[in-house]
Amino acid sequence: MPSHTTLVYNKHFSLTTSTAQSASKVKPNVVSLKPIFWRMYTNQLALEAALMELTLHLERQDSPEVGNIVRGALETIGENAVFTKQVLAKLKASSAG
């Protein structure tokens, strides 16, 4: 029987991969999402800072309309960073308890 991999997201914020050789043999392998979310969060903060620098530069070059568009994107990045940080807190709490 051919091998296949199944990915499952569970309530403990982990990704489970199962490689099955047959219907009766399933070998689970759990991969933590904590380092992935941490990198996503730090990337969001870095992108937010870089975009803010570009926005300030554009505004100094008399392009306030472009600056406003970028500020809208920055607001979305900030909101998403807050969500990512909340997921990180849940991951930390679930691994501690």
Image: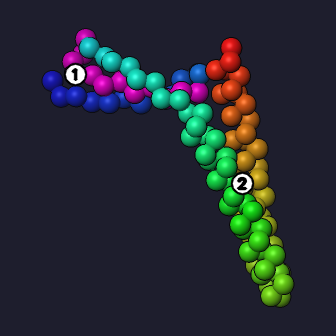
**Viewer-proximal residue, 51 or 71?**
51
Residue at 71% over, 48% down = 80
- Label 1: which residue? 21
Is residue 65 visible in the rendered structure shown here? no
Taking 6 as reference, is 36 above or below it? below
Residue at 73% over, 60% down = 48
**x and y percentages locating residue 69 in the rendered image:** 76, 72
Secondary element at tag 2: helix
Residue at 26% over, 14% down = 25
Depth check, mark 1 against mark 2: the one in front is 2
Taking 6 as reference, is 66 above or below it? below
> Which badge, 1 or 2, is on the more N-terminal residue?
1
- Label 2: which residue? 45
Q: Amino acid at mark 1?
A: Gln
Taking 11 as reference, is 88 above or below it? below
Taking 19 as reference, is 41 above or below it? below
**x and y percentages locating residue 30 in the rendered image:** 46, 24
- Cβ–Cβ under 8 Å for marks 1 and 2: no
Q: Amino acid at mark 2?
A: Leu
Quarter occupied by residue 21: top left
Q: 27 left or right of 14?
A: left
Secondary element at tag 1: strand
**Viewer-proximal residue, 97 or 25?**
97
Q: What's the magenta region?
A: 13-24
**x and y percentages locating residue 28 in the rendered image:** 38, 19
